[in-house]
Amino acid sequence: MSGTDTGPTVDEESTEREITTDQVTLNTVSKNLVSICREMGINLKNTAYSPIFNEGLDFSCAIFDADAEMIGQAEFCPAQIGAMPFIVEWCVEELGKDAFEPGDVVLHNDPYRGGCHIPEHFVMKPAFVDDELVGFAASIGHMAEIGGKTPGGFAADATEVFQEGYRLPPVKIVEGGDDVEAIWKIILNNVRTPRVSYGDLRALISSVDLGQERLEELTERYGIQEFGRIVEDVQTYSERRMRSFIDSIPNGTYEGEDYMDDDGIDDGPFKLHVSIEVRDDEIVADWSATDDQTDGPINATFGVTSSATWNALLQLYEGDMPVNKGSYEPIHVIARPGSIANVDYPKPEVGGNTETHPRMVNTVYRAMAEPLPEQVTAADGSTCMNFLFGGTHPETGEPYVNYHLEGMGWGGRPDGDGNDSVIVVNGNCRNTPVEVFETRYPWLTENYELRQDSGGAGRHRGGLGIERVIESRAPEITVSALFDRMKNAPWGHRGGNEGAKSSITVERADRDGFETFVDAFGTASPSKFADVKISEGDRIRIRSPGGGGYGDPTERPDENVREDVREGFVSEASAAEEYGLALEGSPSEPSEAE
């Protein structure tokens, strides 16, 4: 989806309309919609084949009304949820409402049709009551294998979208309850792992089957007209809550800036810039000063940029409200076509959703640090640490592909330290247990621990990143990576120090010592590369970034520093150097956390 403005103009009728639903019914229907989405997610988790679904929970579920407006969602991946309104709107507009019949399921993954990036596969199923279309159940999930030039689809050296994987416009994969075999054949003929891909798609479809049934039951309970009126009141309530929050921010224009390391093809830095204008109870976020789109795959679609903007402001919102179309209504986004914030076809974009989105959230934080100094945190690691690999399992002879991501440190907060080893703010995904990782794939995990000294020093310390060392147990594994934060460290806030940077290094079985992939394999970037062949006995070391510190480190209570040292979070040397607390037996150098 291209354009320079999000969207809806201010609907004065919506903001002024009276909410006539009583509070109990309003809350009951709102919670029911959330419960339906949660149940859809549980169904998807329990039936999917890939660890990225059944362990990582890299999916989202939502409910939309017949006008393609979001009316309910659960606590899944903010990046996906923020893109779903664009996708549903696009699907309904392209196919037309009359195209939907009972039993249909539409599949879509085209980032240039409102999507976020190619791996996110979106399915939606219409719900009918008394032969009338009343809404849609929708799910979106990150498929581990999507074809393209490299296993897992994260072609970090891609220069056009065609190298990233297959793209599907909105098409019916199920029609009237029956599979559309031609679509299934096209998909399964273009992936390296057809059995697993088939199972994951079935899980996505199963989730919307359940959501459609539950939405119809809820609508029938109240009646079509009454249910529609209640849902409209829920949206109005959410819009008023968001407008009230924005109205509490002083009017003005606030600037934020951050930088991406490189794009996998050319060296950076590449600038992200947002200008946020607060106009009473509305916000206009203008990304026009962001750099031009890059040759490599860090570009964001308009849906990603809008989602990141909404995500950041919802993170800053204090309180509880149903998140739906009304929550987004007062926030307008401008993104210049042909920029990193609004990529033009056919430039690559797969990293825009995982790397650029969280950096955009941090960019909004930087802008809002001026009017909301007590609510903005220091920067988090803001990289998914995308590590992809595939091959043939030496024990089973079966092909495999996996998409793996890591937690990193979150920034120090006004009221406490940053969280340790948590996925980026747009992900909300879980860690895959080592036992599952080793059972499914030919890797031995030698080491997996929190990185000492990786959190930025501050009155409130940044959260810690992780270190993972894995050894190949197969004759050959094809690996790819798409990381960031190797050059531009997570920034501190209000006097806090930077967090540690990320890294991925390799020790070849016939060499001593870890080295970058640039040195070992001649890749263009140390953090973004594709199709590197790893041999048996080769070891890979992944280090995720820590969060920035919040506040002057000298203001951190000595007892907190001593506790950090006892827990192993901070070395004695760093306690002395960063916090000015000399402990008996302090070594001369801090631990390695670069």
Image: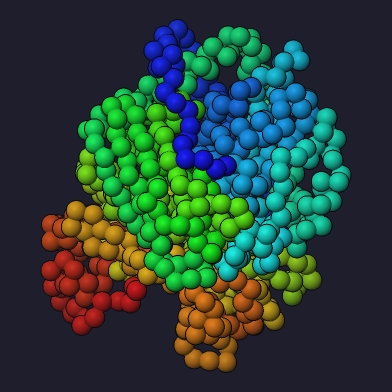
Query: Residue 489: x, y in percent?
Result: 33, 65
Image quarter for residue 316? top left
Note whether 398 is above or below 179 in the view shown.
Answer: below
Residue 464 appears anywhere in the view? no
Quadrant into which the N terminus falls = top right
Query: Residue 202: x, y in percent?
Result: 75, 44
Note whether 159 is above or below 277 in the view shown.
Answer: below
Residue pictured at 82% horizontal, 48% vertical: 184
Note whether 474 is above or below 216 in the view shown.
Answer: below
Residue pictured at 23% horizontal, 54% vertical: 493
Taking 358 as reference, is 397 left or right?
Answer: right
Residue nearest the viewer, comparing 41 with 270: 270
Taking 368 as reference, is 541 left or right?
Answer: right
Query: Residue 346: x, y in percent?
Result: 62, 55
Report the colour scheme.
rainbow
Residue pictured at 41% horizontal, 9% vertical: 18
Residue nearest the viewer, comparing 247 with 570: 247
